[in-house]
Each structure stands twice: as C-alpha cells, then as structure tokens.
Image (cartoon, grey):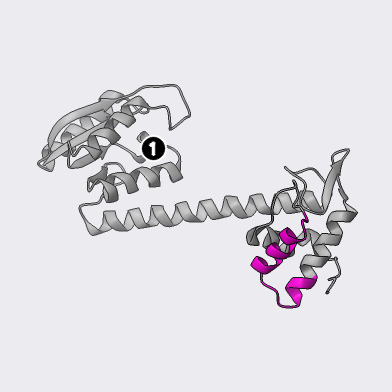
C-alpha cells in the first residue's frame, strides 16, 4: 500500500517527517512522496503543494494520505471537511491524522469523520442563522443592509417606504391569502406589466420572498 504526505507549515517539519516515517514503518506503508510547504498565508486556496496532492489523488497515485495533525492540512473546518470528502469519497483514499489518531481504515476513524461533518454543518447553519438575525435587526432599525427590500428604498442610509411598491405588497398578500399560488400571482403581475424591484419580471420565488418578508407584516391584504 502506498502513502503520500503533505507537510504544511507548523510544528517542526523535521518533527512531522519523523512522525510520518515512523507511522508508515509501523503500519507497513510505502512512503512514496512527502510534500512540504511553508507559506505565510491564511488562504487555503493558495497552497500549490496541496493542489499537487489533490491532483495526485484524482490520478490514483497513492492509497493513503497521512498527515501529522489535522491543522497541518487546513485550519478551516469547512474546508477540511470538503478535502476529506474529496479524498475519501471521491478518490477512494484512506485518510490518517496521526496526532488525533484518526484513521479511516477503522470504524473509529470513520466515526470521527462523521463528527467532523456534523460539526461543519452545525457551524455553517450557525453562521447563516446569525447573519440573518443581524440583517433582520439592522433592517428593523432602518439601517442599510445591501439592497433595499421590495416596498422600501434608502434615504440617508435609512429605510423609507415606497408607496407604489407597498401597494403591490398588499395586492400580493391579498391574492395569496385568497388562495392564489405564487406562480399565478407572478403571472398576474407580469400580465399587468407591474415591474419587480428593478423593473424586471416576477417569479414565484420573488413573490414568495415579498409575501413572507417580516418587513411587510403590518401590511393589510388588498383582496380583489
């Protein structure tokens, strides 16, 4: 069985090399290549040696990827999960991190990967939810956040209502509350030549966004 090892910056390169060589010897692995990269950058997308490893993995040049410690591959948990997914599931390569005793050749290692995947998804959702909360609070205060939502515009960095658009909001709410689908409402608006926020055509998803927006909770429905 062949193995290949990346060596990004971190605790002594010589120390990592020794750890990996010892692991390979104890586990009957042929160490075919050792990648070493010392680069002062925080970008996980600017590691040429890592790109070489990825290419070698897709070319089937090795069977096992061994690293001294997980953060030697990347410190970004979402990127780490993406790399593991790529190496293990797409390329069919075993993954070993010596210090964490993570080895996908055994059940405990596979369980560890599942935990990393769970934590990654949790972290992604946490950031997404927090971002939405911050945006919602800023909009409630009338502070500028990206483009103004339908029904409003910015004036002196504060949200102010656009009467013509708020009238359309009430029409959308009325039609939806009377049972009309988002698709039919969008078609009706387009047939009546009522432009969307930037004058474009309406889509079901656009209508849904306007209808469900917390910015329009106070709007009365105009049925008819």
Q: Quadrant of the C terminus?
A: bottom right
Of residues 4 and 68, the one drawn nearer to the viewer in this rendering: 4
Residue 184 falls inside the magenta stretch: yes
Q: Which residues are magenta?
A: 174-194
Q: Is residue 106 left or right of residue 173?
A: left
Identify the residue position indicated by label 1 in the image.
Answer: 71
Residue 20 placement (x, y as % from top left): 21, 34
Q: Is residue 21 left or right of residue 137?
A: left
**Looking at the image, can residue 122 be seen?**
yes
Query: How many marks overall?
Result: 1
Whether residue 102 is visible, yes or no, is: no
Magenta highlight: main SS: helix
| Front position in the image: 211 or 1 | 211
Q: Residue at x 45, y 54 (%)?
A: 119
Query: Which residue is depicted at the point 18% across and 39% down?
Result: 60
191 w.r.t. 15: above or below: below
Q: Residue 185 in the image: x percent, y percent? A: 71, 66
Determine the residue located farthest toward the bottom in the rendered image.
Answer: 178
Residues 62 and 190: in front is 190
Judge by depth and name the residue closer to the eye, 77 or 208: 208
Q: Residue at x 52, y 51 (%)?
A: 124
Q: How packed is label 1: few (under 14 Cα within 10 Å), some, or many (20 or more)?
A: some
Residue 50 position within the rendered picture, expressed as x and y whole percent measured from the top left: 33, 31
């Amino acid at each position: 069985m062949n193995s290949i090892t990346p060596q990004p910056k971190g605790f002594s390169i010589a120390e990592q090399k020794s750890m990996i060589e010892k692991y390979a010897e104890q586990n009957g692995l042929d160490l075919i290549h050792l990648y070493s990269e010392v680069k002062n950058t925080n970008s996980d997308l600017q590691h040429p040696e890592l790109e070489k490893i990825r290419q070698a993995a897709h070319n089937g040049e090795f069977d096992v990827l061994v690293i001294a410690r997980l953060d030697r591959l990347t410190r970004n948990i979402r990127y780490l999960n993406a790399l593991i997914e790529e190496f293990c599931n797409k390329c069919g390569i075993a993954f070993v991190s010596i210090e964490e005793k993570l080895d996908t050749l055994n059940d405990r290692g596979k369980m560890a990967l599942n935990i990393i995947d769970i934590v990654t998804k949790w972290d992604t959702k946490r950031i997404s939810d927090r971002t939405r909360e911050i945006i919602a609070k800023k909009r409630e205060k009338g502070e500028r956040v990206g483009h103004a939502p339908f029904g409003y515009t910015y004036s002196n960095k504060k949200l102010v209502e656009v009467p013509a658009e708020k009238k359309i909001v009430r029409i959308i709410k009325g039609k939806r509350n009377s049972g009309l689908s988002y698709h039919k409402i969008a078609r009706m608006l387009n047939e009546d030549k009522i432009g969307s926020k930037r004058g474009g055509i309406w889509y079901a998803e656009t209508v849904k966004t306007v209808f469900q927006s917390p910015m329009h909770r106070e709007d009365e429905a105009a049925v008819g």
